[in-house]
Image: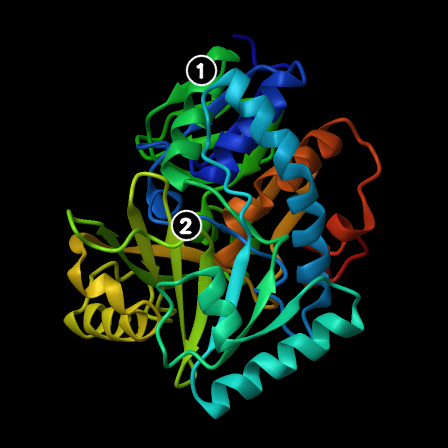
Amino acid sequence: MGSERAVAVVGGGVIGLSVAWAVAEAGYPVRLVDPAPARGASWLAGGMLAPVTESWPGEEHVLELGSSSLARWPDFAARLTAAGGDPGLRLEGTLAVALDSADVGTLDVLAEFLRGLGREAVRCSGRELRALEPGIGPGVRSGLHVPGDLAVDNRALLTALHTACRRSGVEFITATARAVHPNAVVLADESTVDCAAVVVTAGAWSGHLHPALAPLVRPVKGEILRLHTRPGTLPVPTRTIRAHVESRPVYLVPRLDGELVLGATQLEVGFDESVTAGAVRDLLRDAERVLPGIAEYALVETAAGLRSGSPDNLPLIGLLEPGLLVATGHHRNGLLLAPVTAGAVVSLLREEELPAAVRAADPARFLGRDA
């Protein structure tokens, strides 16, 4: 494969694979550099596609970008099913629930914020929530029903993307990148991958690859548990449930096979990927107050992943310099933002105008130049 039109994508998580697939489908030769594609933080994600219940006053740009990407998800999932496999998109919606009075106050702030933006979110009493999801515990006092916030099976998604990339002709280079430059990737063994353009999609490790990214991308640790139903236990809920338990956030994301994903802590501890006993205890305790029946589930996995945080919770999507693009810093929303990010990279390569929601994520906002 010649390098005159080739695009090198550095990082093989959900963003890197989505970008590589989209760029290959657009007709470019693609080389994806990652020592273990389809793993990393994306492999450990909960799978929420939830821009509304993730939103908060002051982060309107995050909500706008997330909503723009969510609108693309049904078509993205359909095309991916045909190209690589079913990613397990769930359309049942999300419940945001609260237990004590302080938690209800937090929910009130979110509800008022969403109402002001015209977003769909229906207030529910505890009884109404239990009518929707009978497993919800008696301590849950109120909540919001957000039918538009969806979920996806992150591991099925990664497997499907990996397959779609291979079928689209993406060349996988199973090596570690040490640095990136316009039109070249330097590998750990000092060899180079020459190309017409580089796209940095290395998540929390992106800051190690280019000096401009070092102050802009940081790791945010998230510990996550996977539980599974056992004979005689209550089934997993139908909908994703996001809760505040004495001001601590916890989410519970069901899978069709009886698995339930619990998460996630958010810790600023550098590149520490250890799972602490305290985190496991706290997640199980809080989740059990929301869904008491999980006490009888099997605990099948504990893990920690490193999300890529940015200074303002918006990702970095755009040009660092000619021949060098970046698509990283997606924090909690990597799976949600995969379709819009992949589309934006293709548009950047074609020198097309980007939508306003994507232009807000241009790294130029931190680099002292116009977008």
The residue tagged 2 is 205
Residue at left 69%, top 75%?
A: 58
SS for dot 1: helix
Kind of residue indicated by mark 1: Arg
- Check residue 204 in the rendering and tell me which mark sits there, or answer none: none
Tell me where residue 284 appears, x and y as whole percent.
24, 69
Above or below — where is 264 with respect to 76? below
**Residue 261 visible in the shown view:** yes
* Three-letter amino acid code at the position of disc 2: Trp
The label on residue 166 is: 1
Determine whether, in the image, residue 365 is placed left or right of residue 284: right
Please tell me whether residue 93 is drawn above or below residue 220 in the rendered image. above
- Left or right, 275 with respect to 29, comes to left
Q: Where residue 9 appears, x then y in whole percent?
A: 51, 31
Asked if one can make out residue 208 in the rendered structure from this viewpoint, the answer is no
- Mark 2 neighbour density, 10 Å: few (under 14) some (14–19) many (20 or more): many
Please give the name of the residue rendered at 43% of the width and 38% of the height, measured from the top-left corner.
Answer: 13
